[in-house]
Image: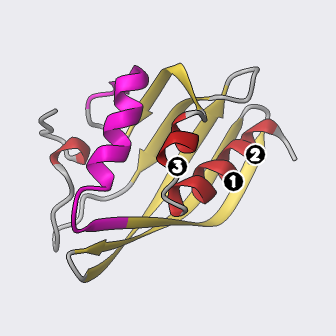
Amino acid sequence: MTPVQQAVDSHVALWNAIDRESWIKLFSPAMVFEDPVGTPEKVGVDAVYKSWDRSFKPGRRWTLHPEHVVAAGNEAAVVMRNEGDLAGEKVTIRSIEIFIVDNSGLLVRIRSFFDQPSDFALSDYFTPERTD
């Protein structure tokens, strides 16, 4: 298994296991999230913590389900099904995500392409007009 495939697998497994501390260790201190692409980039360790904490607010639970992964070099393109439980309401967002790892296998960039939902609200951290 390539380092980027390992990073994607670990990202999904640790996220779904709600293992915050192990998940955080997957990321380079220089991490950049474009989540979603088109919003301001979220950079560094602070962005890693905020991405987790904004996704796991009370009453919110997201699980990740990779439907197709294509790895090449230090990058992987992933078709991802994101299933949410938002205070008892079941929702799904499908995304295309680009994962990039550095030479040590740490994640340095994730670009996430998805349409903003119109039938439920995401955390402001993941919207075009975000507030930190």
Residue found farthest to the top? 30
Q: How is the image coloured?
A: secondary structure
Q: Residue at x 30, y 37 (%)?
A: 38
CB atoms of marks 1 and 2 within 8 Å: yes
Please tell me which residue is depicted at 73% across the width and 52% down the height of the picture: 70
Q: What's the amino acid at mark 3?
A: Glu
Above or below for 83 versus 112: below
| Left or right of 91, for residue 105 | right
Q: Assess disc 3: are there few (<14), some (14-19) or many (≥20) residues with their C-alpha within 10 Å of its C-alpha.
A: many
Image position of 121 with respect to 124: above or below: below
Q: How many marks are shown on the rendered structure? A: 3
Callout 1 secondary element: helix
- Give the number of the disc on residue 97: 3
Q: Which residue carries the number 2 mark?
A: 6
Q: Residue 60: name its quadrant.
A: bottom left
Q: Are marks 3 and 2 in contact (CB under 8 Å)?
A: no
Q: Quadrant of the C terminus?
A: top left
Q: Earlier in the sequence, mark 1 or mark 3?
A: 1
Q: Nearer the viewer, mark 3 or mark 2?
A: 2
| Residue that mark 1 sits on | 9
Across and down, in percent, residue 8 comes to 66, 48
User: Residue 30: where, in percent of width, then height?
Assistant: 50, 17
The crowding category of the residue bearing disc 2, from other C-alpha atoms within 10 Å (few below 14, some 14 to 19, many at least 20), is: some
Q: Which residues are magenta?
A: 40-61
| Amino acid type indicated by mark 2 | Gln
In which image quadrant can residue 119 be found? Answer: bottom left
Residue 73 appears anywhere in the view: yes
Label 3, label 2: how many angstroms apart (C-alpha)?
15 Å
- Helix, strand or loop at mark 2: helix
Q: Residue at 21%, 58% (x, y): give it.
A: 122
